[in-house]
Image: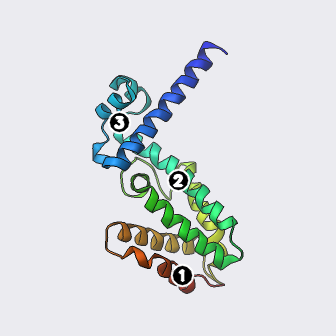
């Protein structure tokens, strides 16, 4: 292995450590607790080393959002692949999405609430974000109904899921009614 390869491997490992530490700190104490100073202390590197990877907190949030998008896409696809039939896939997707949002609140915030400097619904949208939407579209497109654009239907369904996730987390919706909400959403929107 060349010196250059070793340095690249070490750099990638440091970057993974920075992101894992940022996620852990954000999940434990919220994103306000994530500062470059605190991250540098936790990972035992200097702040300049951190800045050699990310220009600041905004870029760290963006990188966490991209990781989260890839994780959510995988979770949604896995859940949908285990379901039989279009409606069952839509319901499994909804449950997986809501479960992801509940289990990873700081990552979910990085993806959809905080400014990570990422473009959405644009040709400059990073691939992990496009893929996360594609993971939703794969199952939801088949239940959009005749004459309904699958992408538009997926946006509306996703917006509904986001609203449910956000309102439940904020204590505005009782969590014990999560399953009836999923069933109602699928029953009323899925046209199969």
| Gap in angstroms between the C-alphas marked 3 and 1 | 42 Å
Q: Residues within 10 Å of mark 3 (few under 14, many from 20)?
A: few
Element type at mark 2 = helix
Identify the colour scheme used. rainbow
Residue 91: % across, % down: 59, 75
Q: Residues within 10 Å of mark 1 (few under 14, many from 20)?
A: some
Residue at x-position 35% and y-position 23%: 48
Residue at x-position 31% and y-position 49%: 30
Residue, disc 2: 69
Q: In the rendered image of this protein, does residue 145 appear above or below residue 97?
A: below
Residue, disc 3: 56
Quadrant that contains the C terminus? bottom right
First-in-chain label (2 vs 3) = 3
| Gap in angstroms between the C-alphas marked 2 and 3 | 20 Å
Element type at mark 1 = helix
Residue, disc 1: 183
| Gap in angstroms between the C-alphas marked 1 and 2 | 24 Å
First-in-chain label (1 vs 2) = 2
Residue 138: % across, % down: 65, 66
Residue at x-position 44% and y-position 55%: 104
Q: In the rendered image of this protein, does residue 58 appear above or below residue 160?
A: above
Q: Nearer the viewer, residue 7 or 43?
A: 43
Q: How many marks?
A: 3
Question: Is 107 on the left-hand or right-hand side of 86?
Answer: left
Residue 136: % across, % down: 59, 65
């Amino acid at each position: 292995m060349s010196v250059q390869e070793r340095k690249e491997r070490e750099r990638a490992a440091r970057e993974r450590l920075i992101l894992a530490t940022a996620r852990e700190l954000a999940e434990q104490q919220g994103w306000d607790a994530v500062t470059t100073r605190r991250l540098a202390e936790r990972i035992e590197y200097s702040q300049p080393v951190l800045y050699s990877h990310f220009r600041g907190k905004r870029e760290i949030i963006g990188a966490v959002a991209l990781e989260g998008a890839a994780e959510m896409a995988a979770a949604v696809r896995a859940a949908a692949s285990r379901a039989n039939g279009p409606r069952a896939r839509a319901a499994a997707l909804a449950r997986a999405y809501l479960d992801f949002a509940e289990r990873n609140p700081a990552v979910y915030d990085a993806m959809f609430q905080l400014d990570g400097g990422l473009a959405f619904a644009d040709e400059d949208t990073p691939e992990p974000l496009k893929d996360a939407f594609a993971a939703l579209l794969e199952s939801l497109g088949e239940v959009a109904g005749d004459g309904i654009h699958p992408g538009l239907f997926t946006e509306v369904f996703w917006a509904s899921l986001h609203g449910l996730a956000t309102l439940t987390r904020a204590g505005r919706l009782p969590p014990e009614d999560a399953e009836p909400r999923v069933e109602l959403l699928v029953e009323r929107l899925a046209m199969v």
